[in-house]
Amino acid sequence: MSPELQPQQSFENEPYGFTEHERLFERISHKHLLSILENPMTDILKTEVSSNVFGEFLFVTTKRMASQQAVHITFWGLGFHEFRERWLQDEWFWYETTPPPFDAQERLTREQALTRINERHAEIMVSPHPARSSRSKLYEMLADLTDEDGALVRRMATWEIAS
């Protein structure tokens, strides 16, 4: 059977315990992330503040075993989402990654990772929270209906038309 026709992995066997909603929107709560990281089945490979097209965030790369295979997930949050014009402080986006090259060499202790996350959380909680524009609210609605990349393309197209 071709890979496109194979059934999707059932949520009951999902190694990170994501709900159907979390899988669909690729987003989890801060509380759920902490429970994932506190679980001994989770290896925390790396935490770093870095940037993507949406802003500067804390990225947390993890690994869990599923059957005979490792599943790597990177979570990103605790930063200012420039297009949504709001701080991601109580939710995390995530994506599945290929095994990173540092997997075998670099692992954080649970305590180190949680300390970094708590420090970053405290840091952004005292940051100013500006009022959001109607454009950012529209972007967020489109992003939630489609996906971040699709909303970004629509936003850029709107700017081109408006210019």
Image (cartoon, rainbow, N blue to C red):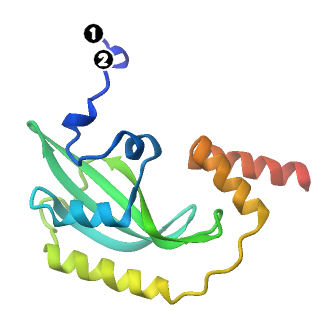
Q: Which residue is rendered at x = 88% and y = 48% of the image?
A: 161
Q: Which residue is rendered at x = 19% and y = 35% of the image?
A: 13
Location of residue 54 with respect to 96 vertically, above or below: below
Left-right relation of 131 to 45? right
Left-right relation of 25 to 118? right
Write down the quadrant of residue 145 in the picture. Answer: top right
Query: Picture coordinates of residue 154 (x, y %)?
Result: 72, 45
Q: Which residue is rendered at x = 27% and y = 9% of the image?
A: 1
Helix, strand or loop for disc 1: loop
Q: What is the three-letter code of the residue carrying label 1?
A: Met
Left-right relation of 7 to 57? left
Q: In front: 120, or 125?
A: 125
Mark 1 surroundings: few (<14), some (14-19) or many (≥20) residues within 10 A: few
Query: Picture coordinates of residue 124 (x, y %)?
Result: 48, 83
Image quarter (top left, top right, bottom left or bottom right) of the C terminus: bottom right
Q: In front: 4, or 42?
A: 42
Query: Picture coordinates of residue 157 (x, y %)?
Result: 78, 47
Helix, strand or loop for disc 2: loop
Numbered tag placed on residue 28 in the rendering: none
Q: Dots 2 and 1: beta carbons under 8 Å?
A: yes
View extreme (right): residue: 163
Numbered tag placed on residue 1 in the rendering: 1
- Distance, label 2 to label 1, CA atoms, is 7 Å
Numbered tag placed on residue 6 in the rendering: 2
Write down the quadrant of residue 159 in the picture. Answer: bottom right
Q: What is the three-letter code of the residue carrying label 2?
A: Gln
